[in-house]
Every structure is written in C-alpha cells, then in structure tokens.
Amino acid sequence: MKKVLKTMLMGILVLSLSVSAFAKKKIYVGTNAEFPPFEYLENGKPAGFDIDLVEEMGKIMDCDIKVVDMAFDGLLPALQMKKVDVVIAGMTETPERLKTVSFTSPYYKASQVIVVREGENNIKSFDDLKGKKIGVMLGFTGDIVVSKIDNVKIERYNAAYAGIMALKANKIDAIVLDSEPAKNFVAQNGGLEIADVEGAQEEYAIAVRKNDQKLMEELNKALEEVKSNGKYDELIDKYFK
C-alpha cells in the first residue's frame, strides 16, 4: 500500500513539474480603457487597437497577456512598482517620462486636435485657446500641450467622455484630444466638430521599466514581426477605416 501511494505521489509530482515546465510566461499590461478606439471597455473588459496589438505581440513572444485597467496617471507608477510589466495606452515618449521608464519603437503616429461645438469657428490655432476654459485628459499629451499656453484655464478629466459631456453642456469652451479618439467622440456625439487647426504630431510607444532590456528587445522584435506579417495592417483597417 505504501509503495502504491509513493508511486502515485511521484506521478503527481512529475505531472506537476511537466505542467510548470510548459506554462507560458505571463505579461501584465497596464492600460487606461478611456481612450477609444485604442482602448475601451467592451462587456466589462478592455478592448481596442492597443489591446489587439499587444495580444498579437504576445502570440509571437509565446506569452499570456493579462490586461489591467487603471487610471492613466497611475500607469507609470504601477509599472515602476512592478504591478504591471508594460504599459500601452496611447502613450507618447517625453523627456519627463524618459527619466523613469523606457519606450519601445513607436507603433502609431497621431496628432493633437481641438474639439469644439459645431458652428463655433473662433479657434484657428492653439494660440486661440488663450483666455478660454479648455478641457484635457489628465496626464495626456493634450494636458502637456495646453499647459504650455499662457492664460488658459485648464479643466482636467480622468475620462475623455467626461470632457466631451462638459463641452456639450457649455461648461468648457473646447477640449484637446488625440486625433483618433477625437474623431470617435465627434462621430458619436452630435453637435460637435474638430476645429480646422493643425496640431503637433506625436508617436505612441509601449513603456517598459528601464532595467527590463530583454523584455524591451522581445517587444521590439514582436512589434516588427506584427508589422511585417500583415496583422498590423489588419488592425489598422479594423479600427481606423
């Protein structure tokens, strides 16, 4: 009986070790699902261009992707505290962010635009925001851009939709957003339009801890393969055409 029990225990141990040996590495991805079409909630789960992109990259890296939704201004602190391994959230590389994290090669080019109420054509440039109350997403590039303009009263929102609602309710004069989310919100909310203003270009990239050089190399290699194997173009068609 003891011999049988010992054999069974050895079998369970071997099976357990075998399963562990073949278990995929998990990569925890921080995002902020308030930025459609790049990331948003669908049936309570993060979805969008960024999510699909990082999942395609995970397939190439043979990793399980676990997406964690949180406030945008909490993403980089969570990365530094090792609560997540990478961050993908329509985030732009800036000198300030480079002090604490590193970024992969860019995966998307965008620009800042100004959303106004239809028929209000008094904003012809970003300088015309002076003296006005302008909405921005807390910590996003629009926040950085508008903060550099003198004499602007800035209203910061954790969710772009809150800013859109404030604009429709005449609580602010305009809202500065990234181009693709702005198009998305305007299409879904009557009475708004994008001002005919040329905004600064920016590039989105994936944030990684500075000492995670191996992960950075793996991500860049996977991103390059996603772009070359046709999956990237499929996602562009799916979300932006």
Image (spheres, rainbow, N blue to C red):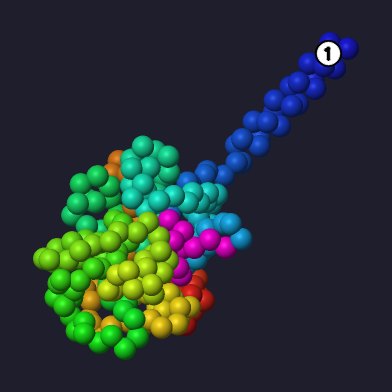
Residue highlighted by disc 1: 3
- Say whether residue 229 is visible: no
Considering only vertical position in the picture, is 50 above or below 99? below
* Nearest to the observer: residue 37 or residue 218: 37
- Say whether residue 120 is visible: yes
- Judge from the rendering whether residue 13 lies leftward or rightward of residue 47; answer left or right: right
| Segment tinted magenta in the rendering | 32-42
* Nearest to the observer: residue 226 or residue 194: 194
Mark 1 belongs to which amino acid? Lys
Q: Residue sitting at 53 percent across and 49 percent down?
A: 66
User: Where is residue 63 shown, x and y percent of the image?
Assistant: 52, 49
Q: Dividing the picture into quarters, in which one does residue 225 lie?
A: bottom left
Q: Dividing the picture into quarters, in which one does residue 169 lie?
A: bottom left
Is 174 in the magenta? Answer: no
Considering only vertical position in the picture, is 78 above or below 193? above
The residue lying furthest to the top in this view is 2
